[in-house]
Image (spheres, coloured by chain):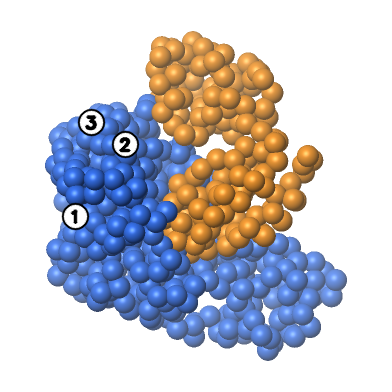
Chain colours: A orange, B blue
């Protein structure tokens, strides 16, 4: 993840996996983000060409969805739920704490509901959801991340 | 001696509070003691406040232990876990836990009971019986049963499912689709997720029945990307079903073809709106379509499409098995059957409670939920997600009935119930409603796209104490415009929570506190 360019062959593999079907654009972009963490300008060009779409079409889809980052994320991705059930259990305070607590190598993002609303507040760390997260538990989760500065 | 079965849920909530670590600790402890065990990964029963909840099969009974942490495991073994031994975490037989046995489990009856990814276990628990019955009775009888059941869309809109299916069945086309909406974006809701994680084959069967009823050979499930574990479980279930001949061409020699493609969303809330979801399934921006044409006539790729929520579809197999009347016998007025209510936020016993319509909010929140988690007085309850009104402690005796909720300016939506205690500042919640709409608006219509941003600004001025009366009136007028002129529920219902705060919690603005 998070190199400054995305390997062309790897994108081609993903496109192939979805049968080069233009209606699979959202799925293709999702797979690219899951593997590489983000979508570069070059990827947009490549997809437009491979799927026979205009660059504007691809660009529009990339811009539309929150998941499709257009810059490389940090080594770790931490998402703190900002939706109502978590708000009711102190997610605003947890978010303030998280902003102070995460390292430079970590991308902190908002997320609106992880579907873990009976065990709020919820946090997702590198794709795994954690429940009943207070400041102390947050620090434990962050502290356990590999290769942290 | 046969291996002792130990159930540890593989469910996002259970795993989020340590279920995987508990399973690992149990395996290690058993190995160290040379005990023969078999760990079964079931769904969660929905008593989320007890998670991770471990069960041990002793004779015919499953003995439950609640809030098990990995460090409890050696002690549990010392206490005779494998024989259901006494321990402070022991809850007793799972079928004697009041929270669970007092429910009306129609749609969720297999969730928690079975091993989620075991096709054999599914088949041993009525699996695919309804599909086979549908083949015997024919498509019309299926639609008739669904119509008779009074089932309405559980995603929030409450549209009668039988009418939708009839429309698609009666529309001539060379291709039809089933599109299952699993983009469960409302805060406070997790019933779709629990169903998909706990009974994925049940959903697959439900889609196949819908396909058979209306004449569609292809189904899509549009799953939100935030549900990572759900995606893993559902993908595996679909592959398993296909490998075993329950999906694909000529299913079990019946002559019926049906397959399912699983799509992931990409973090857009509005893609839970049916037409935006169809756009996204076509690989485009999730921008809401004008209606008409209805998706039942011109849906996915312009073809007749049944768009149904996960819980709606999953309610169907039992309707086919047991008959529509049985379902319609539950509930009140035009709200027939059951809803899987989800107790969330600041609540002591949060979880999933499937009950017949007509139960009151108080019975759910105080009876099942045990009041607030903080122990402080309840201040507000938001029912139905971010577009749902905030209700006061005085409104808790309202029965859960679609029409009764409309009468008080509220909605049931997808059945999420989020509780707030008296430390909540409701002005901030009203502000959040507008802010969320501004973040998530698809941008097609002006009242939603612009109105939400202006709404945040007006609320900020109100909170700041600036020209209070003037800004109050302006906010009410803005709510009118959004409600009357937005294209879909996103802009059209964002005013619900805002107005409810103005109506019931105006003092939170007046205090100007942040």
Q: Which residue is tagged 3?
A: B446
Q: Is residue B24 left or right of residue B10?
A: right
Say whether disc 2 or disc 3 marks the residue closer to the N-terminus: 3
Viewer-closest of A56 and B142: A56
Labels in figure, total:
3
Say whether disc 2 or disc 1 marks the residue closer to the N-terminus: 1
What secondary structure is found at the residue carrying circle 2? helix
Residue at (51% x, 50% y) in the render? A81
Q: Residues within 10 Å of mark 3 (few under 14, many from 20)?
A: some
Give the distance between the C-alpha atoms of the residues marked 2 and 1, in whole angstroms: 34 Å
Residue B160 is tagged as 1
Residue at (53% x, 71% y) in the render? B49
Residue B293 sits in quarter = top left
Instruction: For the C terminus of chain A, give its image quadrant.
Output: top right
Q: Quick check: marks 2 and 3 in contact, CB under 8 Å?
A: no
Q: Residues within 10 Å of mark 2 (few under 14, many from 20)?
A: some
Residue B259 sits in quarter = top left
Give the distance between the C-alpha atoms of the residues marked 2 and 3, in whole angstroms: 11 Å
Relative to B172, is A145 above or below? Answer: below
Give the distance between the C-alpha atoms of the residues marked 3 and 1, in whole angstroms: 30 Å
For the residues beneath circles 2 and 3, the answer to whether they share a chain is: yes
Residue B453 is tagged as 2
Say whether disc 3 or disc 1 marks the residue closer to the N-terminus: 1
Q: x%, y% of residue B161? A: 22, 53
Viewer-closest of B244 and A55: A55
């Amino acid at each position: 993840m998070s190199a400054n360019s995305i390997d062309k062959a790897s994108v081609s593999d993903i496109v192939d996996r979805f049968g080069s079907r233009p209606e699979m654009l959202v799925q293709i972009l999702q797979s690219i983000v899951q593997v590489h963490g983000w979508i570069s300008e070059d990827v947009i060009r490549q997809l437009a060409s491979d799927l026979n779409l205009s660059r504007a079409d691809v660009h529009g889809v990339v811009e539309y969805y929150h998941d499709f980052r257009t810059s490389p994320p940090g080594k770790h991705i931490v998402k703190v739920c900002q939706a109502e059930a978590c708000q009711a259990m102190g997610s605003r305070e947890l978010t303030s704490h998280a902003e102070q607590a995460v390292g430079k190598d970590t991308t902190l993002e908002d997320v609106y509901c992880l579907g873990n609303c009976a065990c709020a507040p919820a946090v997702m760390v590198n794709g795994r959801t954690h429940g009943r997260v207070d400041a102390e538990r947050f620090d434990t989760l962050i502290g356990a991340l590999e290769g942290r500065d | 001696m046969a291996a002792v079965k130990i159930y540890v849920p593989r469910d996002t909530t259970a795993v989020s509070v340590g279920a995987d670590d508990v399973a690992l600790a149990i395996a290690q402890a058993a190995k160290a003691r040379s005990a023969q065990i078999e760990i079964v990964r079931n769904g969660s029963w929905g008593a989320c406040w007890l998670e991770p909840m471990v069960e041990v099969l002793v004779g015919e009974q499953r003995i439950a232990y609640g809030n098990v942490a990995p460090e409890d495991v050696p002690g549990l073994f010392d206490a005779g876990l494998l024989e259901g031994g006494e321990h402070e975490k022991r809850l007793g037989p799972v079928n004697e836990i009041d929270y669970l046995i007092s429910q009306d489990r129609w749609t969720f009856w297999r969730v928690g009971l079975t091993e989620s990814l075991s096709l054999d276990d599914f088949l041993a628990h009525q699996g695919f019986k309804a599909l086979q019955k549908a083949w015997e009775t024919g498509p019309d009888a299926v639609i008739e049963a669904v119509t008779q059941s009074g089932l309405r869309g559980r995603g929030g809109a409450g549209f009668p499912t039988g009418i939708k299916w009839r429309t698609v069945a009666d529309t001539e086309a060379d291709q039809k689709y089933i599109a299952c909406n699993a983009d469960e974006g409302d805060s406070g809701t997790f019933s779709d997720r629990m169903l998909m994680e706990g009974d994925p084959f049940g959903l697959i069967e439900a889609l196949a029945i819908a396909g058979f009823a209306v004449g569609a050979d292809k189904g899509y499930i549009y799953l939100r990307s935030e549900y990572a574990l759900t995606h893993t479980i559902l993908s595996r279930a679909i592959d398993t079903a296909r490998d075993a001949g329950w999906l694909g061409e000529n299913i079990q020699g019946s002559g019926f073809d049906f397959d399912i493609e699983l799509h992931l969303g990409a973090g857009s809330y509005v893609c839970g709106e049916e037409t935006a979801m169809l756009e996204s399934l076509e690989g485009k921006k999730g921008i809401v379509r004008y209606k008409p044409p209805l998706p039942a006539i011109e849906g996915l790729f312009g073809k007749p499409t049944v768009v149904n929520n996960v819980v709606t579809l999953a309610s169907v197999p039992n309707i086919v098995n047991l008959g529509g009347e049985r379902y319609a016998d539950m509930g009140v007025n035009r709200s027939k059957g059951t809803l899987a209510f989800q107790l969330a936020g600041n609540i002591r016993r949060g979880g999933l409670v499937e009950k017949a319509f007509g139960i009151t909010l108080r019975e759910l929140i105080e009876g099942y939920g045990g009041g607030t988690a903080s122990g402080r007085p309840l201040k507000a309850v938001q029912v139905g997600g971010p577009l749902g009104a905030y209700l006061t402690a005085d409104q808790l005796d309202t029965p859960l009935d679609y029409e009764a909720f409309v009468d008080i300016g509220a909605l049931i939506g997808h059945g999420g119930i989020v509780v707030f205690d008296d430390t909540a500042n409701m002005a901030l919640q009203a502000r959040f409603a507008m802010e969320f709409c501004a973040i998530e608006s698809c941008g097609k219509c002006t009242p939603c796209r612009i109105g939400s941003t202006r709404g945040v600004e007006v609320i900020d001025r109100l909170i700041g104490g600036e020209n209070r009366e003037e800004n109050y009136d302006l906010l009410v007028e803005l709510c009118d415009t959004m409600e009357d002129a937005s294209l879909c529920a996103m802009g059209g219902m964002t005013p619900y929570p805002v107005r409810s705060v103005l109506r019931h919690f105006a003092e939170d603005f007046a205090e100007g506190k942040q």
